[in-house]
Amino acid sequence: MAPRQAPTVRQRRFGTELRRLRDAVGMSAPVAAEKLGGDRTMISNIESGRFGISDERLRRLANIYECDDPALIDALSAMTGGRSKGWWDEYRGKIPPDFLDVAILEHHATSLRTLQTAHIPGLFQTEDHARTLFDLFVPALPRLEVELRVAQRLARHRVVAGDRSVPYVGLIHEAALRMRVGGRRVATAQLKRLLEESERDNVQLLVIPFAAGAFPMAGETVLYVSAANSQLDTVEVDSQVGAVFLDSPTQLANFRRRLDLVEQVALNPKESRDLILDIVSDM
């Protein structure tokens, strides 16, 4: 099997967790490889995400690492499965890999929670809104890449609207709602789209009003992706140089706590809808 040239964040996440299990028993990678019956580089390649692993070998490794958490092992097992392609693969090599990593994480999530202080959540952006944002890039993006990014962003919506209907909590600051991205017509259509999405049983859109004042993580854009086992959760944070993915237990606990605090200052779903309706009236 040829090594993966560019492992996805999810593939690297799988390897990271195996490394943590190995570190917990104080075993070196060469010793683990020997016990598994492979060459000295096998474990390092698996932990870096460059090579996959079968379910049978995963369970043997879990036994070698004395892991007695069947729920974690089953969740890791689900991450090994299949080599089938996802809808996002048609965009591979055409748009930044960060975009695909986010789509893959969303696809496999058990729930999603996001904080957006300057933008509308990507899953709910209209075509015109998304295109306007990509047209603002400096230096300017080629027209084909803009259209590919827009199409990929619109396709992500299936996470909340498809058969799985993943539970979603979106924390959106009032500033993002009042920003007239694309002008009055585009901005009004975007707010109406948010109102429609907020009626889904699996979607909660909670507005942080200006009146809330300062709050934790003000100015940040964060996506918290819950996995089948909480140890396998991932946080994505937007930065000026692209997406940053975090997954240490301390980081995960920190972001869960801070997002909880933000929810406490946000309006409830009905109040949030009422404020969005008021903003639409002001447009």
Image (cartoon, grey):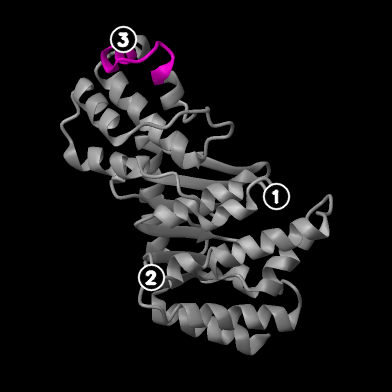
Circle 2: element type? loop
Secondary structure mostly taken by the magenta-highlighted segment of the chain:
helix
Q: What label sits on residue 163 in the rendered view?
A: 2
Q: Are marks 3 and 2 in contact (CB under 8 Å)?
A: no
- Alpha carbons under labels 1 and 3: distance apart: 40 Å
**Can you identify the residue that label 1 sits on?**
94
| Residue 15, above or below 170 | above
Circle 1: element type? loop
- Residue 18 seen by the camera: yes
| Residue 184, above or below 69 | below
Instruction: Point out residue 136 in the picture as x, y percentages from the top left corner.
Output: 79, 60
Question: The residue under label 3 is which amino acid type?
Answer: Val
Left or right, residue 283 beside residue 136: left
**Are there few (<14), some (14-19), or many (20+) residues within 10 Å of tag 3?**
some
| Residue 205, above or below 218 | below
Residue, x 37% and y 45% (percent of image)? 233
Q: Which comes sooner in the sequence, label 3 or label 2?
A: 3
Q: Is residue 33 magenta?
A: yes
